[in-house]
Every structure is written in structure tokens, then in C-alpha cells.
Image: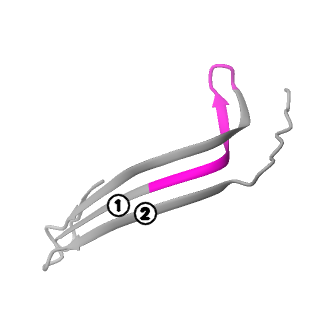
Amino acid sequence: MHSKLLLISKPESEFPTETGVQYFSDDNKIMGRVTAFNRNVKNIIFFYFNLSAFLSQYVKQNKQKDHGADLEITFKPTKNISLKAF
């Protein structure tokens, strides 16, 4: 097994933003939520695993950008039954 020394010159830094809205019906049988996010990371270190070679290592990369949205809907037809989709 070989090991490599990973030199880290700068700490990881990020600027995440997130916003969303949530809705409840008057009778609380329907609930909905939408969330959008954006994440910019610099000097990131991540764990990489190569399944075919069965090797793993930490890898340094300059930046990573993630963005997306989450949607969640809940329907509660009775007191004891709750259906969720997300």
C-alpha cells in the first residue's frame, strides 16, 4: 500500500446561499416547500475512491460549484396517514 502526503496551502472556504418558501393549507392537510441553493467552495479537498483498482486518496481541487433546488410535498388525508413526495 502506498501513501501520499497531501500538502494543504490554504484552508477550504465557501460562500453558500439558500432561499425557500413554505406553504400550509388552512386545514393542515397539504404542505409544500421549495428551496433553492448555491454553493461556491475554494481550495476543496475530497475523498476519491477508484472502485476498479480498489484504491482511495484525498484529492485537492481549486474550486467546486453546486446549485440546485429541493421540492417537498406532504398530503395528510387523515390523522394517521401522511403521504410525502420529495
* Residue ID at (29%, 59%): 72
Q: Residue at x 42, y 57 (%)?
A: 37
The answer to whether mark 1 and mark 2 are in CB contact below 8 A is yes
Q: Is residue 71 left or right of residue 56?
A: left
Where 48 falls versus 53 (above or below)? below
Q: Secondary structure at mark 2?
A: strand
Where does label 1 land, which residue?
35
Does 27 sit left or right of 18 as displayed?
left
Outermost residue to the bottom? 26
In the rendering, at what x and y percent does residue 71 appear? Answer: 29, 56
Identify the residue at horizontal 35%, vertical 53% (top origin).
69
* Res 70 → quadrant: bottom left
Q: Secondary structure at mark 1?
A: strand
Which residue range is magenta in the image?
38-54
Residue for badge 2: 18
Majority secondary structure of the magenta segment?
strand
Q: Position of residue 65 (x, y in %)?
A: 52, 46
Q: Name the foreground residue: 59 vs 78.
A: 59
How crowded pointer 1 is (Cα within 10 Å; few <14, some 14-19, many 20+) is rated as some
Q: Distance between the Cα atoms at labels 1 and 2?
A: 7 Å
Magenta segment includes 15: no
- Is 39 a magenta residue? yes
Q: Residue 58 is drawn in which quadrant?
A: top right
Choose the circle earlier in sequence order: 1 or 2: 2
- Name the residue type under label 1: Thr
For residue 5, the mark is: none
Above or below, 39 against 17 in this view is: above
Q: Is residue 21 above or below residue 85?
A: below
The crowding category of the residue bearing disc 2, from other C-alpha atoms within 10 Å (few below 14, some 14 to 19, many at least 20), is few
Q: Amino acid at mark 2?
A: Glu
Whole-percent x, y for residue 67 in the image: 43, 49
The number of callouts visible is 2
